[in-house]
Image (cartoon, rainbow, N blue to C red):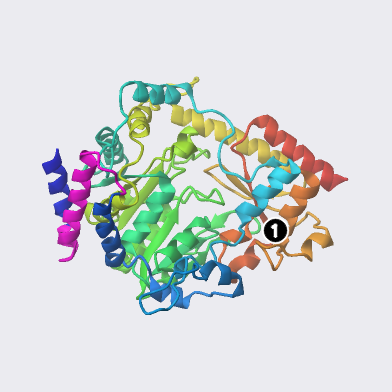
Amino acid sequence: RILEIFRFAMGYKYLAGTWSLFSVHVAHAAWLQMHTIHPRGESLQGPRMEITDLIKHEHVEAAANSEINDEDDDMLSPLPGLGSAAGQPRQVPAYRLAGTDRPTVWSEFAQLAVSTGAINLGQGFPDWQPPDFVVEQAHESLQNGFHQYTRPAGHPPLTAVLAKRYSAHLRRHVDETTDVAITVGASQALYLTLQALLNPGDEVLLLEPAFDLYYGQIRLAGGSVVPVPLRLDDRSKRWDLDVRALDAAVSSRTKLLVLNSPHNPTGKVFSRDEMMQIAEVVRRHPNLLVISDEVYKYVVHSGGPHVHFAALPDMWERTVTLSSAGKTFSITGWQAGWCIGPSRLIKPIQLLLPFVQFCVSTPMQQALAQVLSLADEPFEGHESYYDWLCALYRHKRELLASQLSRCGIVPLEGQGGFFLMADTSAVHVPESYLTHGTPACPEMTRDWALCRYLAVEVGVIAIPASPFYSPPNRPLAANLVRFAFCKGDEVLQAAADRIHRAIKA
């Protein structure tokens, strides 16, 4: 087993001459873990420092271009008595973290939810328990002795199941050892993919509005965001791809496109035709790679298909597909995600895994290896659990949409996920909310002010859309608000009733 791990690690040396020494460090770390030496022992500190240098994790160049203002002084001030060899004080923490201590939309509205007791339609996790067959597999995994480290790149039973499933999804062979990496949720899958593929100065295309996590992670990897707004048709309330704008946004510095379907926050599911147009753009630019974020792939509740971007002609070699189990099985706390792609893109991710954690929770991986297939079986009168899930969310979206409509809030079109974006232009926002900024939003925007009003005076938490846009495009969000409908029917109804009473009063 130790020799196998050593050979596995040594296989990475193709990346560059310096990676040969690095692969020995990975194999040595694996040997230490196999012999239960504490993972924080001094023997691992050398490799940890070396990988930081090799992948340019510090990104001094990116930090030099970032805006650091007076609010960051405390964050960047040196610790007492800590200085460099030249006698100069060191900055604590690193420059790349400048600004990350500031309040965010999430911290502000989470505090409002607690202080007001409002119904929370802001947070994107279900308020019900996972199905029994999922919990049963977790119990079995624990009872059957899966308590120790497993393979850093992924528990073999789980990678085997994922390889088999994605071989069918993508209509090609997916190798369970070289083409799959298991991560601590999809957020870490995204983080590692960006760290493995981006160099300082590389550009990343984002279709806006975009999940706000993307912006911070791209910055941490040394990249810069190039936003490409989706077009919102005022008449149909449909989100459309502007393929010409996407093509025009590609430059000699562009390295990645992040594609998210079903899409957060809009709920848009990109059609096959739109995917083919995106693929054509990728073909025209040989250096462009794609991260396809598909965490909501099993929640296409419109009845249409989910299109795997990597299944399109020529796209397998250019794409890392990300997903996870949390949204599908209502187990967001299990934190198990994965990356699927060609070995040339997955191996660098596998290389990083032992340096962020030795492995994802073994019992959770063992359970998921069974759960993914059990979900194909008939469930609650439906052909499969996946079919039942789509029907559940179709009902909940229709319930919330109909109730918001009677309040004068117009639901925008969406085909997947469990978020609903709505046009609130007909809703009056009290002037007092428009004229006072907050630490998270010093220059108050209409969408943010409306959400504060809903929280404080109506008792409902929703999320303003402006944080899902880059600063130049935030005016596009003025009338838009995001609601999460992954909640019980009685919760959705109660929230809608509160809004209706306040608006119609």
Residue extending furthest toward the front: 81
Stretch in magenta:
13-40
Residue 16 lies within the magenta run:
yes
Dominant SS in magenta:
helix
Report the residue marked by disc 1: 448
Q: Position of residue 478 (x, y in %)?
A: 68, 62
- Residue at (49% x, 64% y) in the render: 242
The quarter of the displayed image where residue 488 is located: top right
Q: Amino acid at mark 1?
A: Trp
The quarter of the displayed image where residue 82 is located: bottom left
- Residue at (74% x, 54% y) in the render: 452
Q: Position of residue 312 (x, y in %)?
A: 32, 52
Work out whether residue 38 or residue 403 is closer to the camera in this orientation and state it.
38
- Residue at (38% x, 50% y) in the render: 189
469 relative to 350, above or below: below
The quarter of the displayed image where residue 495 is located: top right
| Residue 237 visible in the current orientation | no
Work out whether residue 54 or residue 37 is closer to the camera in this orientation and state it.
37
133 relative to 292, above or below: above
| Residue 82 visible in the current orientation | yes
Residue 470 lies within the magenta run:
no
Work out whether residue 109 or residue 235 is closer to the camera in this orientation and state it.
109
Q: Residues within 10 Å of mark 1 (few under 14, many from 20)?
A: many
Q: Is residue 423 left or right of residue 326?
A: right
Quadrant containing the C terminus is top right
Q: Position of residue 277 (x, y in %)?
A: 40, 60
- Residue at (16% x, 44% y) in the render: 5
493 relative to 306, above or below: above
Quadrant containing the N terminus is top left
